[in-house]
Amino acid sequence: MGPSPPHWITVDAGAQGHILSAPVAAAADTPRFDCSAMDGFAVSSAATRGATIAKPTIFALADDIPAAAAAGCLPPGSAAPISTGAPIPADADSVAAKERSIVIDRVLQISEPVAPWCNVRRRGEDALAGKRVAEAGIVLSPELIGALLSYGVTHVEARHPPRIDIIATGSELVAPTGTGASVRLDSNGPMIGAMCKSLGLPSRVSDPIPDDILLVSRRIMSKDKFPPADMLVSTGGVSVGNHDLVREALESIGARIIFHGVVMRPGKPILFALLPDGRPFFGLPGNPVAALVGFRFFAFAAARRLIGLPREKGRNIAAPVAARGGTTLFLRARRNDSNGDSIELLEDQRSHVMGSVVEADCWARIDDTANGPVATLFDRVPVLR
């Protein structure tokens, strides 16, 4: 499974969430020319050198310079009203603030010296043409879109964020709109869909699918009412019970099972397969914490791979607990300090208990090695970067 191919996209509101696949350089000097940083009066700073309240410098007012004006020339001995962003005319090098100036009968009086290039945005001070302004792997945020357009960049090479189809399985489940005292609401689908949204990954969450091989296989292959998903994620139905049918449904449609079961807690029954068309499929366990861990540390890693981002790196910390017989543990924890040098493991680590997930702000992964337990700290909710 390799990264999806990049493509050229227009830098506009629709580009948000795409990931740059190549560095971007400014296409033009920004600002394009020396321009005014405020509404005021374009003047020659040298002419104001001796200005005082008792003996102000006097300028005749030239024509107004709006923001859309072309660069012009300031007549000798004059000043020009100028708008924010307007080009500084030749023979001027500063802008006198409007509120610190006096105009009487189209004569400007300035009673203090104006420093050279005061209130002027210099050409290229934000970015010079050709300067690298964004790196590959950066998500196109609203701020970056605005910056790129100001730098004259209208098209970039990028990958779209992977679209994820989320399939909850289990005859006992109903959609969150269901009612009744004995109803078991599907929480995994909405939970993973919400995490996708927080990551900027478009997703579809289906109503729960009953434990039926034909219905599950049809739902996996379904591409209606949704752009074809780049990755599919199911919850439930991957353990060893009589009603755990996801693997059998995958095999019935010709999917290739890459692995089924990982020596980890929670989430041991996790399954990974490639569909006949090559798209990745993750079968997550039904216990909610196991499903969350499976998505956070497996499906999210695959999403990073699809958009060409490197493997996520956690932060090594002192192991807060002994390893468990060759099993990797994913434990809910809270940081005791801003650096995360010290953490507190939450008391209830059972795979069906969500209360301790809500209390946690990080995950501690504990790996059993020949040299003893190794601990790595990860944010509870990751970001694409």
Image (tube, rainbow, N blue to C red):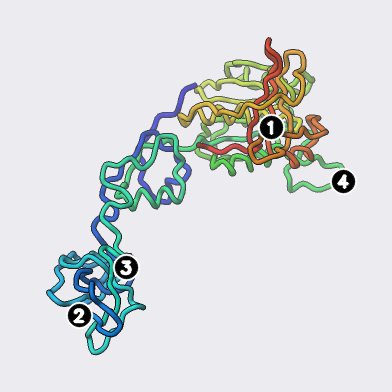
Instruction: Find disc 2 in the rendering and name its residue.
Output: 59
Label 2, secondary structure: give it.
Answer: strand
Please name the amino acid that badge 4 sits on. Answer: Ala
Q: Is residue 171 above or below residue 87?
A: above
Q: Earlier in the sequence, mark 2 or mark 4?
A: 2
User: Which residue bears the numbered disc 3?
Assistant: 84
**Which residue is nearer to you in this view: 285 or 344?**
344
The span from disc 2 to disc 4 (Cα, nearest Å) is: 83 Å
Label 4 packing within 10 angstroms: few (<14), some (14-19), many (20+): few
Q: Position of residue 81 (x, y in %)?
A: 25, 76
* Residue 215 in view here: no
* Label whose residue precedes the other's in the sequence (4 or 1): 4
For this orientation, the residue located farthest to the right is 181
Mark 3 vs 1, N-terminal side: 3
Relative side of 3 to 241, left or right: left
Residue lying at the far top in this picture: please name it: 370
Q: Which residue is mark 4?
A: 181
Mark 3: amino acid: Thr
Please tell me the numbered disc located at residue 363.
1
Residue 254 is drawn in which quadrant? Answer: top right
Residue at left 31%, top 48%?
127
Q: Are marks 4 and 1 in contact (CB under 8 Å)?
A: no
* Residue found at x 39% / y 33%: 21
How dense is the environment of label 1, judged by Cα within 10 Å: few (below 14), some, or many (20 and up)? many
What kind of element bears circle 4? loop
Q: Marks 2/3: CA distance?
A: 20 Å
Between residue 151 and residue 140, name the one nearer to us.
Answer: 151
